[in-house]
């Protein structure tokens, strides 16, 4: 187990591989652990880090740390502590919120963002996500496969308040998102019960450097439901030259679909 201290509070993380830095940020259910299959794929070319956010996994549990600003402070402190400069971020749910906001604040640091299961509007979040205990949310959002068991195992470590407080900041972040110039791929699962799919008019208004991909056979966890496909998309996105729009990606036929 690896950890740093931020003002005497533990931030747990794990790391695999060598190369350019790539940081994974988990969502409202689970911990760093469900990124393992994706980290293993990325570690061939990248030094892949995965962090437990405040209130989750083995990081500190303090209600005063659960605001979005404090989670962003965690990411900033982590990068600074490990001497990580230019970085790519892959975030899921809550982690996508943090990654996008951090990219807005630090475009000089964040080279690109892959935002998974990110709601484009506050009313696109199922109310159950705001009220259910994390262990119950895991049962709701997950199928039963070997890849999903790490989420179930660590769901009980999360504090429900860490989920609820983070969602209180969603509206302000979404307004700011349209100002972002950092390359971004938004990934959604067609069958996600927690987050509604982006609509055509929303996609049309997205920033120039943003691409939307929907996985037809996925729910809330595309990286687990269609792991191989997710890894291929991530690899192609990370391989794009810096500063190039992901709209230039040659999307494989299996990713192409019309969203409603």
Image: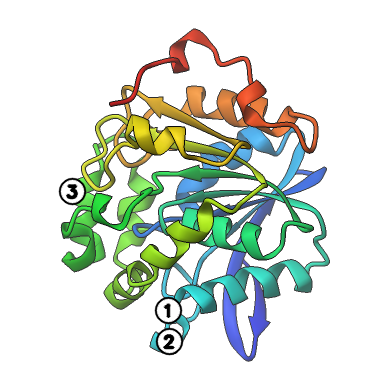
Q: Are marks 2 and 1 in contact (CB under 8 Å)?
A: yes
- Classify residue 86 by image quadrant: bottom right
Q: Badge 1: few (under 14), some or many (20 or more) residues near its Cα, within 10 Å?
A: many
Residue 175 place in picture, x, y as percent? 45, 59
Up-down: is 117 above or below 12? above
Residue at (61, 51) in percent of width and height: 180
Looking at this view, is 161 or 122 the one in front?
Answer: 122
Disc number for residue 77: none
**Left or right, residue 52 beside residue 144:** right
Residue at (24, 55) in percent of width and height: 123
**Left or right, residue 111 beside residue 178:** right
Looking at this view, is 194 or 51 the one in front?
Answer: 194
- Which of the marked residues, 3 or 1, is nearer the chain's N terminus? 1
How far apart are the alpha carbons under marks 3 and 1?
23 Å
As helix, strand or loop, the secondary structure at mark 2 comes to loop
- Which of the marked residues, 2 or 3, is nearer the chain's N terminus? 2
**Which residue is tagged 3?**
140
Residue 145 place in picture, x, y as percent? 30, 34
Q: From the image, which quarter does the C terminus lie in? A: top left
**Which residue is tagged 2?**
62
Residue at (22, 56) in percent of width and height: 137
**Which residue is tagged 1?**
66
Do we see residue 31 in this rendering?
no
**Left or right, residue 151 beside residue 77:** left
Looking at this view, is 167 or 107 the one in front?
Answer: 107
As helix, strand or loop, the secondary structure at mark 3 comes to helix
């Amino acid at each position: 187990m690896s950890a740093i201290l931020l003002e005497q509070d533990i931030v747990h993380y794990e790391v695999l591989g060598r190369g350019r830095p790539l940081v994974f940020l988990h969502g409202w259910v689970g911990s760093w652990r469900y990124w393992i299959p994706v980290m293993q794929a990325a570690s061939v070319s990248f030094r892949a880090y995965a962090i437990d956010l405040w209130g989750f996994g083995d990081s500190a549990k303090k209600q005063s740390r659960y605001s979005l600003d404090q989670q962003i402070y965690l990411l900033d402190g982590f990068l600074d502590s490990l001497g990580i400069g230019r970085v790519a971020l892959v975030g899921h749910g809550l982690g996508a919120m943090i990654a996008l906001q951090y990219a807005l604040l630090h475009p000089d640091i964040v080279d690109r963002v892959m935002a998974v299961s990110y709601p484009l509007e506050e009313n696109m979040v199922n109310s159950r996500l705001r009220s259910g205990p994390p262990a119950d949310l895991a049962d709701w959002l997950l199928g039963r496969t070997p890849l999903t068991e790490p989420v179930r195992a660590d769901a009980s470590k999360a504090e429900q308040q860490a989920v609820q407080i983070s969602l209180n900041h969603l509206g302000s972040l979404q307004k700011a998102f349209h100002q972002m110039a950092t390359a971004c791929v938004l990934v959604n699962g067609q069958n996600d019960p927690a987050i509604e799919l982006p609509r055509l008019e929303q996609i049309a208004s997205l920033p120039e450097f943003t691409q939307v991909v929907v996985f037809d056979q996925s729910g809330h966890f595309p990286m687990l439901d269609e792991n191989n496909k997710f890894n291929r998309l991530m690899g192609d996105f990370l391989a794009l030259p810096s500063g190039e729009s992901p709209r230039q990606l040659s999307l494989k036929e299996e990713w192409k679909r019309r969203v409603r």
